[in-house]
Amino acid sequence: MSEELRTLLALTLVFAPLSLLSIGGGAALLAEIEHQSVAVHAWTTQREFADLFAISRAAPGPGTMLSTLIGWKVAGFAGALTATALPPLVTSGLWRGAALGPLARLALAFGGGAWARSHRLRIDTGGRRRRAARIARRARCLGRGGAVGGLDIVPSESPSARALLGWRSGVRLGRRARSVVT
Amino acid sequence: MQHTPETRRGKWVGLPALFVAFFRLGVMSFGGGTAGWLYREIVERRRWINDKEFLSGAALGRLVPGSSGVNLTVQVGQQLRGGAGAATAVLALLSGPLAIVLALAAAYDGVGQSHVLHAVLDGVAAAAIGLTFATGLKLVQFNRASAGPLAVTIATVLCVGVLRWPMIPVVLCIAPVSIGLALLDRRGRNV
């Protein structure tokens, strides 16, 4: 029993950090998953890994099934469940803006800016839309909001998020920013 | 701002309906193109969310770590029914493929070391690797990339793919360099 728990823990320790790195999709992680499961932990042989990869690609689903198969191979059904449920849990923890909320916003602000701008997408992380829109508009009114233009990161009213937005636009947004422009 | 709230929050989507929709989605989405299937199923057919909501969800899904399809699902479920909706949607999306994949894996174990099976799997793996490789090449955007980002890309490929260094430290070292280069580049362009 404790042996099994230890295996599940090992799976967790491998896949949870990796899922935090999988920005833009899981394909980037293939090499590392292979390295971890073949060389480091000897969960599968090279041959088995190739087979599992093929199975995961032939089956339907959102492309996260390779970790499921490795989990299953190592620790049966419990392993499969652990490896499947983990990434959504970790990343949706990010989403909900709970403990790691600022981290997600940072990732958004840095990594996402260029991509979103090139696709002309407006990103809205929720919160008070109207107030955030005012902040963004103020940045634009001051004539230096070009950097905010294509990408309105519209955060909540948290000071750190406002500072981030201000920094990106080259405008310092004070606490009263929201009341200046209507 | 053009956020005209055409919110039809009157549209009440029950959790069972949500489950059924995303279960179908999970079973149908071959090849990992969950976002496309989700658009067809949820936006066009059922009209639960509109284009704008889908787009911002898709953008966020790409930017936040994790499988973009799963992220988008969390986002849509969350929008429709809050936390319970998000959990239901993800559960529904993953449970179908999970069952199928496990059945395939059990069959794989049962058949054992047959030559035919290995040949089939080798073929599938080769095609899948080709697709993944093509996606990577497309993402590099050779026509637009300047020397800095290309160097970062090549360095990452060398470290992780060829030298087989562990990925997390490599990314932790290279990411700041890459971000710094991008900032410098942008500053240069703005001036």
Image (tube, coloured by chain):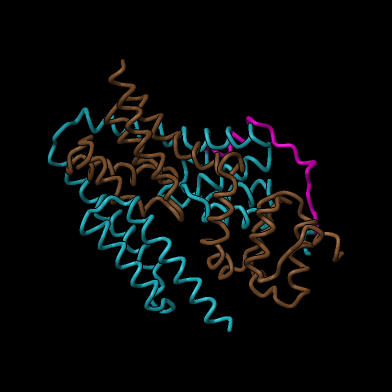
Q: Which residues are magenta?
A: B4-23
Instruction: Report whether A43 appears left or right of B146.
Output: left
Q: In this view of the protein, which residue sits in the foreground, A74 or B172? A: B172
Q: For the image shown, how many numbered marks are present on the structure? A: 0
Q: In this view of the protein, which residue sits in the foreground, A179 or A95? A: A179
For image coordinates 32% across by 35% down, the residue present is A69
For image coordinates 63% across by 54% down, the residue present is B54
For image coordinates 64% across by 60% down, the residue present is A164
Q: Where is residue B164 shown, x and y percent of the image?
A: 22, 54
Instruction: Report whether A145 appears left or right of B172.
Output: right
Instruction: Report whether A96 appears left or right of A145.
Output: left
Q: Where is residue B37 shown, x and y percent of the image?
A: 52, 50
**Rendered shade, chain A:** brown
Quadrant assignment, res B11 = top right
Q: Tell me, yes or no, whether the highlighted magenta stretch contains residue B172.
A: no
**Rendered shade, chain B:** cyan
For image coordinates 26% across by 42% down, the residue present is A36
Q: Tell me, yes or no, whether the highlighted magenta stretch contains residue B8.
A: yes
Q: Where is residue B122 shown, x and y percent of the image?
A: 20, 48
Quadrant assignment, res B60 = bottom right
Q: Where is residue A49 shown, x and y percent of the image?
A: 23, 42
A80 up-or-down from B39: above or below: above
B87 up-or-down from A49: above or below: above
